[in-house]
Image: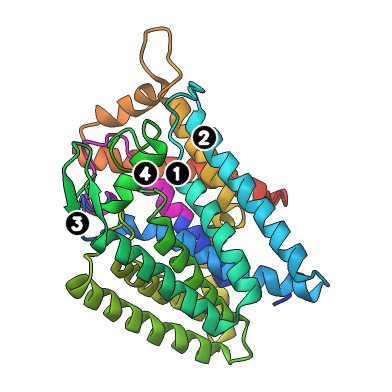
Amino acid sequence: MNKRVLSLDAFRGFAIAAMLLVNNPGDWGHVYAPLLHAKWHGWTFTDWVFPFFVFISGMAMTISFARRAQGGADKAALLLGTWRRAVVIIGIGLLLNLIPGFDFSSVRIPGVLQRLGLCTLAAAPIVIWCGVRGVALWAVLLMAVYSLAQLCLPVPDAEGVIHTGLLEPGKDAASWLDRLLMDGHLWKQARTWDPEGLLSTLPAVSTQLLGVLAGYVLASRKQPAEKTMTWVMAGLASLWLGQVLDAWLMPINKSLWTPSFVFAMAGWALLVFAAFHWLLDAMPQPLARARWEKALHPLVVFGMNALFLFVLSGFVAKMLYVIRLADGRTLGGTLYAPLRGSGLAPVNASLLHAIAFVLVMYGVAWLMYRKHWFIKV
């Protein structure tokens, strides 16, 4: 594991490019259905994005620990270094939530980066001190604890009505815990619950641990084609298990991060990564592999600075609708006006805006790649 894994960079780049696309339409009222999250139960293409990031974090953790251990780092150094990185990521997420008003009295405490950091904090000691079986056991145990809390714990909703096992917005155990600990600091679109809350971080850690298990396969001495087939078979099995849990335990739900969601998204992550690995690292025909490397190079460029691009895009997206011109219009609205008035169907104009945003961010990523500016935490 002493060289970069091209397929992992491309997979990470795919995730960041997809995130940029779905997060930046020109008009949230006109968006193709697959580019929106499922309203509650179920999933869309957009629901791939966040669990893919968490899964990739697990795979990268496996590779990073292996490299650092080969370099002489002991377990304590691995843990402290990883925890430092996780805390910095959480801090960046909180800072993004504070921008632009820096209103500490109502700032949203949870968030995407906060969950990524918390998952890393929890997963690191498990990966460092447990073997493959231990990691798998912890993944199952965390989902079991979460399921017991969600299905068996009587909790009040925002109006004080007690429910047990009711998986409706703001009425489940996770929402109650978030209101208890962070009331007034939750997702403003809901206020009574948060899609990145505390209790649902437990199965999100399981997603990262499943990524760690996939990383063990990547770091193994198996032949590239054998690795690819392992991920394909594991991915199909994970998809099947997600459907079983959807029917018999809890529905697939991104906001609740249910166990069925964990396995369904891990299944898709495994299949998508297996495709990238076959095309970029395992294909036995050198000429064909070189052609795929060229075709997928933009994703590799995205993947080399994924965390920085996530933060930059979030900051830019906010500033576009904070900065106002002399006539009172926002900068974002002004930039979108030509597309809105172009005669295109509103949904297509909105999509074209999102694509343009992705291309602008790619320009930044390409420049950083050419300059060898790789920003890491």
Q: Disc 3 on helix, strand or loop?
A: strand
Q: Position of residue 150 (x, y in %)?
A: 28, 59
Q: Nearer the viewer, residue 3 or 336?
A: 3
Does 266 appear in magenta? no
Classed neighbour count for the residue bearing mark 4: other residues with Cα under 10 Å, few (<14), some (14–19), many (≥20): many
| Relative vertical location of residue 45 with respect to residue 3 in this rendering, above or below | above
First of labels 4, 3 by sequence position: 3
First of labels 3, 2 by sequence position: 2
Q: Disc 1 on helix, strand or loop?
A: loop
The residue at the point 45 percent across, 44 percent down is 111
**Disc assigned to residue 111:** 1
Which callout, 2 or 1, points to the residue nearer the camera? Answer: 1
Pointer 2 with pointer 1, Cβ within 8 A = yes
Report which residue position mark 3 lands on. 164
First of labels 1, 4 by sequence position: 1
Q: Which residues are magenta?
A: 16-36
Q: Amino acid at mark 1?
A: Gly
Classed neighbour count for the residue bearing mark 3: other residues with Cα under 10 Å, few (<14), some (14–19), many (≥20): some
Q: Amino acid at mark 3?
A: Thr
The residue at the point 44 percent across, 26 percent down is 320
Q: Amino acid at mark 4?
A: Asp
Report which residue position mark 2 lands on. 96
